[in-house]
Amino acid sequence: MAKLLIIDDERAIRNTLREILEYENYEVEDIDNGVEGLELIKKKKFDLVLCDIKMNKMDGMEVLEQALAFSPDLPFIMISGHGTVETAIEASKKGAFDFISKPPDLNRLLITVRNALDRGNLVTETKVLKRKASKTRDILGSSDNINKIKETIERVAPTEARVLITGANGSGKELVARWLHEKSQRAENPLIEVNCAAIPSELIESELFGHEKGSFTSAVKQRIGKFELANGGTLFLDEIGDMSLSAQAKVLRALQEHKITRVGGEKEQEVNVRVLAATNKDLLKEIEAGNFRMDLYHRLNVINIHVPHLTERTEDIPEIALNFLEEICRDYGMPVKKISEGAMSALQALPWTGNVRELHNMIERLIILSDKTITENDVISFANPGGGTNIGAAGSNNGHAVSSGSQAVDYDKFSNFQDYKDHAEREFIKFKLEKNNWNVSKTADDIDIQRSHLYSKIEKFGLKRVTE
């Protein structure tokens, strides 16, 4: 339900507007002066403000300016009994969504309110989408290895040098590539990413260089390749060790001559692209095995940045884990959970075969399945959702007993991630209800959700108390 604030020094107007808007199922508050109105806007979250222009204590235009200074996306509808075109223009220039004359026309008022709320929702959604699409996560950690990487990025990014990024899967090679682009002279131009391991060898050349219509059976129209799309910017070739030898030869030519030719085409296209590459393979061994070209290796490996395995920088785990904790809780719209010192030590002792990517998944799992504070037992129980847990290389965690883990889960029965989340949520709620002897009020407080919300979950998952 949208929450509206009316600021007007005429009680009759406030009462009329409140009655109309509450009838339309809006939640409404009203105040008779701008000073107190501003305080309310600072303290509470409103979706829309209807504000009179001529008031005692503070003029409505001043309220508008001050409110938008600290809440720039809050829609304002200005109202006045002395409306003129000049007044409406001034209000619009100062950031008001619209202007309505007194006494307000009912239909126009409701349409304007609806449009203002729709615009406000679109602005919010757009900002969220932009944040998700464009946000480059910080390289977290202060270990010697990470500090060296950050220093190298600062030195290398502003140059045109090619960079080969090495490291295990999930270690953060893509993040390093993104920061090399963000801090380069090409940052305003596109960063185009290609996962060479995900594209069949027969299609990789078309993906990179494009193709002309009719160049092969399924080429029903011309296609622009990644090299052309990245023109003026950066091309990131991830898992380049999986690229076919024929495609490697063409990439080498593109790096040497700064020209490419589309598959099935004859015309050369000039390209101005900085190439970054990454691999989890030992390319020198791949060269010995005849799977990778030595001349391409030396073209790409002007600067080498090796991203260490998470187990090589365990001192960074607390910072990374806390960052993931806040980020995931914020995305889920829930209070940020705490994590105990014992839980953090248990996290540092895990083998992390999946690197930072696995840590992110682990934190998400703990947020879903744990109470307000994540404990050491939670980490031990949920470290391996498919079976036993392996904490520490020798089967112990600095003297702590190793649990056999949670009951094995058959992942094949889940068709998508949402199904798994529903399963995990159902089991968690069932466990908490049984632990609290099916006291719904206590369980709701225990897991920090509203009682009505918990009742909905019980109904959704078909949970029933088993009586003997």
Image (cartoon, rainbow, N blue to C red):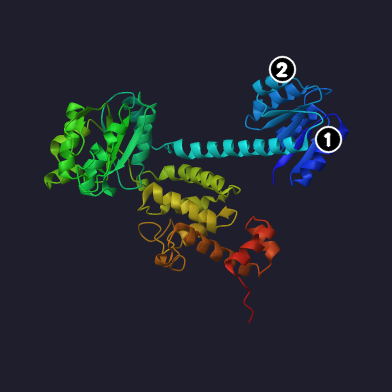
Residue 350: percent from the left, percent from the top?
40, 54
- The local secondary structure at tag 1 comes to helix
Which residue is at a point 65% across and 25% down the rendered structure image? 95
| Residue nearest the observer in this picture, 287 or 460 | 460
When the figure is inspected, residue 362 is found, relative to residue 3, above or below; the finding is: below
When the figure is inspected, residue 424 is found, relative to residue 107, above or below; the finding is: below
| Residue nearest the observer in this picture, 155 or 189 | 189
Type of amino acid under label 2: Glu
User: Looking at the image, is mark 2 or mark 1 earlier in the sequence?
Assistant: 1
Q: What number is the disc on residue 86?
A: 2
Q: Residues within 10 Å of mark 1 (few under 14, many from 20)?
A: many
Q: Label 1: which residue?
A: 14
Type of amino acid under label 1: Arg
Is any part of residue 231 visible from this angle? yes
Which residue is at a point 12% across and 46% down the rendered structure image? 290
Quadrant position of residue 98: top right
Residue 338: percent from the left, percent from the top?
57, 49
- The local secondary structure at tag 2 comes to helix
Q: Residues within 10 Å of mark 2 (few under 14, many from 20)?
A: few
Which residue is at a point 81% across and 29% down the rendered structure image? 102
Residue 91: percent from the left, percent from the top?
70, 22
